[in-house]
Amino acid sequence: MNMNDLFSLQGRVALVTGGSRGIGRMIAAGFLAQGARVYISARKAAACDETARELSSIGPCVSLPADVSTVAGAQALAAAFAAREEKLDILVNNAGAAWGAPFDEFPESGWDKVVDLNLKTPFFLTQALSAQLRLAARTRPAKVINIASIDGISVNPQETYSYAASKAGLIQLTRRMALRLVKDNIVVSAIAPGAFASEMNRTARDQADEVIKHIPAGRIGRDEDMAGAAIYLASTAGDYVVGSTLVVDGGVTHAR
């Protein structure tokens, strides 16, 4: 067994939504370092284009700006990808949103925006790209990796009701999708990140010293922590991980 081949992504094509920053960018950079050709998507075209230019120093990275918060938007991204590639080896459903407000004030808009993007979009984007995934799966297992959160496993003290519900739902959706799609040689799994510094998790970014007090590992997650988890699931090493959610949180889920 060649360990380099086990974790290699050489010759594979990946699409990472929400890839212009944060966790999506960490994953895209990791895939590129392992030899994949990576497409990144984000709602803000300028940011998506700039990140693709920066990541191209590692490997071939292409910007596909898109707003995937609606089914029509997800289908448009799928069509844009299909115009460039016949097959898709790895789909990372990372685009997401969060909303926090007191229980008595929590708005419907804060529910719909978050649940649509975090839970609805991963299903319908995967569906829209199923032909490309199935074509790749003729050669080796294609991969779908949903980015969930530890807030879908244990309770965060912040009042982020729709976020917690959407991420818990995504973990269960991962199981349900996995059992169906493995029949087509498409392996679905998920990652539940803890504290990683990003625009989405400004607390981890801006108040790291305070956040670290609650992390058994004693630090914020690093780029390589997230990249390593995603590479494992995307590569041959993760072929037998079907429907499972990999928790990458420095032990927080066990401690809170």
Image (spheres, rainbow, N blue to C red):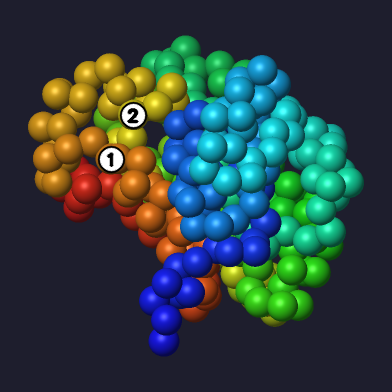
Q: Secondary structure under badge 1?
A: loop
Q: Secondary structure under badge 2?
A: loop
Q: Position of residue 31 (x, y in %)?
A: 52, 52
Q: Is residue 130 visible?
A: no
Picture residue at 73% right of the left edge, 34% below the top: 64
Front residue of 224 and 129: 224
Q: Position of residue 13 (x, y in %)?
A: 67, 56
User: Badge 1 is on which residue?
Assistant: 221
Q: Position of residue 143 (x, y in %)?
A: 61, 64
Picture residue at 61% right of the left edge, 29% below the top: 53
- Nearer the N terminus, badge 1 or badge 2? 2
Give the Cα separation between the discs numbered 1 and 2: 7 Å
Q: Position of residue 244 (x, y in %)?
A: 45, 66
How many marks overall?
2
Q: Is residue 73 left or right of residue 196?
A: right
Picture residue at 28% right of the left edge, 47% below the top: 249
User: Badge 2 is on which residue?
Assistant: 197
| Amino acid beneath label 2 | Ala
Mark 1, residues whose alpha carbon is within 10 Å: few (<14), some, or many (≥20)? many
**Extreme-bottom residue of the structure:** 1
* Tag 1–tag 2 contact (CB < 8 Å): yes
